[in-house]
Amino acid sequence: VVHIPDAFTGQGIVQKIRLIADVTGTAARGECLVRAVEGDLAALDTLRSRIDQPLQVTFVLSFLSGRAQVAGRGTAADGIIRLSGAVNAISEYDGYKAINDEAIIAARPDFVLAMQQGAAPLDAGTVFAHPGFALTPAAARQAFLAMNGLYLLGFGPRTALAARDLAATLYPSLRVGKLPSETGAASVDACNG
Amino acid sequence: MTAASAEAASARRNWRVLLRSPAVVIGTLIAILIAVAIVAATIGAARIPLERLAAALGLTAGDANLIARDRLILWSIRLPRIALACIVGGLLAAAGTIMQGLFRNPLADPSLVGVASGGALAAAATIVLGDRLLAGTTVTLPFEILPVAAFAGSLASTVLLYRIATRDNRTSIAIFLLGGIAIAALAGAGVGLLVFVADDRQLRDITFWMLGSLGGATWSKTATVAPLLGITLIAIPFIARGLDLLVLGEAEAFHMGVEVERLKRIAIVLISAMTGAAVSLTGVIGFVGIVVPHLLRLVIGPGHRLLLPASVCLGAVLLLAADTGARILAAPAEVPIGILTAIVGAPFFLAVLLRQRSLAGL
């Protein structure tokens, strides 16, 4: 039995790939994948260095009859928000918790992020009709995005792409481009060949 | 008997008379409620101190910018939540009082006797199966479906119970009580099954919902339950005497002119509507329905004409105080309110029971 540690950082993904490749006896393909992922992460680093005013982002896990559960520290959502060059607006607690309506106002998120999941997917209209979210900077711009849950929070080889997609929505003026693995230089698929 | 002890006895008598006076009891409880409401209105993640509260309510003058901001937070978040806490607390306590009177059983509580469990099962089913059945389709569920389902579930379980317990137009209270416990167990098993098939997010939603919360309160939610409280208050004079006489037994009450079957029907409809409405908006909040009538009976006696309105007031005080704790104890996160009502309510209740053991004749 091997436990794969979950660290929601770029380095965490690389370690995860190496460990899994080691224990499954596919170290060479693993290194190939690591090179591709590291190339993407480095490009993402460059992208982040161009952001001069990081946005405050809130990740809403669920929205049960008007009660929001929001990501705090140490969550995959917190990790992806950082990778995309933003700041998690909620830093007072760990994990996903039900948040006080007034605390949402106090956190002043510029952007609300959620998962596309379930039979009652969140949309901007629902979120910003909530008395707490209605009084945030995000509501003024209707700044809301729902992304595929696994893509957004999976912390695997595609995570850099998810962070890039998120950054492209958060910072449209940056004109975010393709990452190395997408241009064919170090394709993730090439490692499976 | 010495003069001093006679004096003490007469003072106790006077005290007792005072505690049976509706004006004194209700007046005191409403004063406490107002005090708790003022505290609740001044604390929260966005701080609004007392002097600014007065300004935001338009009572005094102040900085216009601050007033605008305070007013927004007060009117769109804090006041609807305070109102909802008072109404739901009042409904839960009144439902518990009526239920204990109807069943002549101090253990009766809407959350114990199947009514709330039916709502909980319907809510859990909506959370888990709603996702599952509609997976891959483009159909989306509106967000209002959860409270509607919970209300329907509560009513459905009460109707089922009523039909089980009624034969030849006579409702057996014993069967209603025991059947309720069976239905609660069945609903519990159903929720367990749903938990078993739920994914992480659904599991989180179910657990959270089961512990209750007043988060996301709005005026429209408050407006949907407020009429129920009004109906309950209007119904009190009509059911109070019947519930009092029911203590003697159903046959005895009937001979004293109480239309027992009609009383039962009214009481059951009231209980299920009140509990269903409370459960649908705030999830399952236990202990208010059982602790409030007990405490009051020990202090003001068992007469329902005073006990019922007093229960509404004390239920409101208790839930508002608990909700204020839920908002601030782990800020900015929220503690589920069901935890607080039990943590504070249960030991307090036990202490009162032990101290009053001989007095209450338990």
Image (spheres, coloured by chain):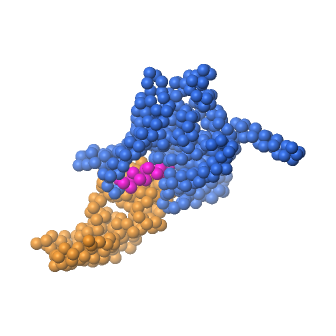
Magenta segment boundaries in residue numbering: B202-214
B103, A119: nearer the viewer: B103
Quarter placement of the C terminus of chain B: top right
- In the picture as drawn, the residue positioned furthest to the left comes out as A193
**Percent coordinates x, y for residue B227 in the rendering:** 53, 35
**Which residue is painted at 78% across and 43% down in the image?**
B12
Magenta stretch encompasses residue B208: yes
Relative to B102, say whether B169 is above or below. above
- Please say whether residue A77 is visible from this viewpoint: yes
B103, A125: nearer the viewer: B103
**Which residue is painted at 58% across and 22% down in the image?**
B254
**Which residue is painted at 65% across and 34% down in the image?**
B303
Any idea which chain is the blue one in this picture?
Answer: B
Relative to B160, say whether A132 is above or below. below
Dividing the picture into quadrants, the one containing residue B141 is top left
Magenta stretch encompasses residue B292: no
Dividing the picture into quadrants, the one containing residue B86 is top right
**Along the horizontal axis of the image, is B275 left or right of B203?**
right
Secondary structure, magenta segment, majority class:
helix
**Along the horizontal axis of the image, is B331 left or right of A65?**
right
